[in-house]
Image (cartoon, rainbow, N blue to C red):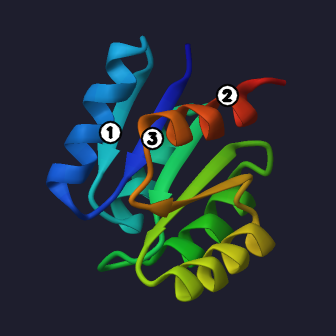
């Protein structure tokens, strides 16, 4: 199973994702923003980073760029909630800067697992 860094400023949403992923056997670390995530990322070897794109302190696009500089091979799943068109635009930017998979909130557990399976299949 994967060692995952889960990054989202919404404590309830992050907790829900953590529980779902832990039930599947994944090891989860949590961060509430990009700054905390980057500190954890320097200390631990994560297989996958799942992060929200809109967060305080350091937003997701900038965090993706910094993660890629530190470890180009890390798998990244970006999440974003908002209007459908706006979500697709922002998620496209996330893909362009280095996200391997993207998820528009709200998404189902199956969508999350499909994205996770896609990045860990190699």
| Quarter of the figure with residue 16 | top left
**In the image shown, does 118 or 60 lie closer to the viewer?**
118
Q: Residue at x 51, y 40 (%)?
A: 112
| Quarter of the figure with residue 115 | top right
Disc 3 to disc 1: CB gap under 8 Å: no
Local SS, label 2? helix
- Return the disc, 2 or 3, that comes first in the chain's sequence: 3
Image quadrant occupied by the C terminus: top right
- Return the disc, 2 or 1, that comes first in the chain's sequence: 1
Measured as percent of width and height from the top left, residue 111 is found at: 54, 42
Disc 2 to disc 1: CB gap under 8 Å: no
User: Is 49 displayed left or right of 97 in the figure?
Assistant: left
- Report, in whole angstroms, how far the alpha carbon at label 3 lies from the one at label 1: 11 Å
Above or below — where is 33 with respect to 16? below
Q: Residue at x 44, y 52 (%)?
A: 107
Measured as percent of width and height from the top left, residue 21 is found at: 39, 26
Q: Which residue is mark 2?
A: 117
- Report, in whole angstroms, how far the alpha carbon at label 2 lies from the one at label 3: 15 Å
Q: Residue at x 27, y 59 (%)?
A: 32
Measured as percent of width and height from the top left, residue 64 is found at: 62, 65
The label number, if any, that marks residue 115 in the structure image: none
Q: Which residue is mark 3?
A: 5
User: Is 46 displayed left or right of 7 in the figure?
Assistant: right
Above or below — where is 54 with respect to 76? below
**In the image shown, does 28 or 89 lie closer to the viewer?**
89
Image quadrant occupied by the N terminus: top right
Near mark 2 (Cα within 10 A), the count class, few <14, some 14-19 or many ≥20, is few
- Return the disc, 3 or 1, that comes first in the chain's sequence: 3
Q: Which residue is mark 1?
A: 17
Above or below — where is 62 with respect to 40? below
Q: Nearer the viewer, mark 3 or mark 1?
A: 1
Q: Residue at x 72, y 48 (%)?
A: 71
């Amino acid at each position: 199973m994967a060692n995952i860094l889960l990054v989202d400023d919404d404590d309830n949403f992050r907790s829900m994702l953590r529980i779902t992923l832990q039930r599947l056997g994944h090891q989860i670390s949590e961060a509430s923003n990009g700054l905390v995530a980057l500190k954890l990322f320097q200390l631990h070897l994560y297989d996958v980073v799942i992060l929200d794109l809109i967060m305080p302190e350091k937003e997701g696009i900038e965090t993706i760029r910094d993660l890629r500089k530190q470890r180009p091979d890390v798998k990244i799943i970006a999440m974003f909630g908002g209007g459908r068109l706006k979500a697709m635009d922002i998620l496209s930017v996330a893909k362009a800067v280095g996200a391997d998979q993207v998820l528009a909130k709200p998404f189902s557990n199956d969508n999350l697992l499909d994205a996770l399976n896609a990045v860990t299949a190699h």
